[in-house]
Amino acid sequence: MPLSPVEVSNIVYRQSVNRKIPTMNKVILIMMYVAVAIFTFLGSMWGTLMLIPTLGTLFFAWYYKGVVSITYEYELDGYDLHIRRISGTRAKPVNIAFAYVNLEKLIVIADQFSPEIEIGEAAFNAADKNHRVTYYTSAQDPDKPSCVLYAHGSGPEDGYIVRIYLQATGPLLHCLKKLCPGKVHTHAELV
């Protein structure tokens, strides 16, 4: 039984997903902090000459940490699912509208590598390469399973097939199941 417009408008949910920082970026960040320590040590022997590289490296490490720390924010408001990408420093965050899905055009949501995903994957592969788009909005952590959403595009992606990797929690999945009965197939409580 479809939901009434009042019931649909009452479904609102917001969730944040912190993306795992890739190992290479962690190594670069650690190397910058080691350089700060070395410049500080050398500054104790050479005086203020080392102050500029010490502060420069420290500032760049702080800025780089903000750039590589990415959070995806899912905002569900009725049939509209907006995904925002947040990065940058606390003083100057970068908040970008990343993806939009109208859930009335949903094909399927299923666990990654499950048989139910074949419907969406077939539609995605059948579409022209120039008319399909993939968004990775999960934690991108192999220890945290994700689910995949397939839908016909809306807004700027009208005419496209959209594939989105989500890191959905139980309450978000519950809302999606209420909005799209029979199209949400998840076997585990994803965290």
Image (cartoon, rainbow, N blue to C red):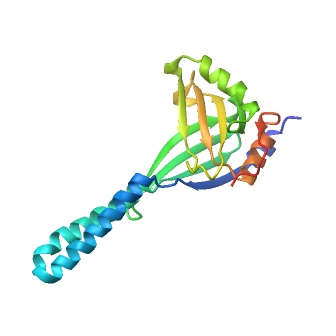
Q: Nearer the viewer, residue 27 or 48?
A: 27
Left or right: residue 103 versus residue 67 is right
Residue lying at 53% horizontally and 21% vertically, measured from the top left:
131
Left or right: residue 128 versus residue 14 is left
Q: Nearer the viewer, residue 80 or 120?
A: 120
Q: Is residue 59 above or below residue 68?
A: below
Residue 132 location in percent, x, y? 54, 25
Left or right: residue 117 versus residue 157 is right
Q: Examine the rendering and report whether any part of residue 93 can be seen.
A: no
Residue 102 location in percent, x, y? 65, 34
Residue at the extreme right of the image, as rendered: 1
Q: Nearer the viewer, residue 74 or 138?
A: 138
Q: Is residue 3 above or below residue 39?
A: above
Residue lying at 12% horizontally and 79% vertically, measured from the top left:
48
Which quadrant of the figure contains the N terminus? Answer: top right
**Quadrant of the rendered structure where residue 136 is?**
top right
Residue lying at 83% horizontally and 39% vertically, measured from the top left:
4
Residue 166 location in percent, x, y? 63, 44
Left or right: residue 191 versus residue 141 is right
Q: Is residue 165 above or below residue 117?
A: below
Residue 87 location in percent, x, y? 44, 54
**Quadrant of the rendered structure where residue 6 is?**
top right
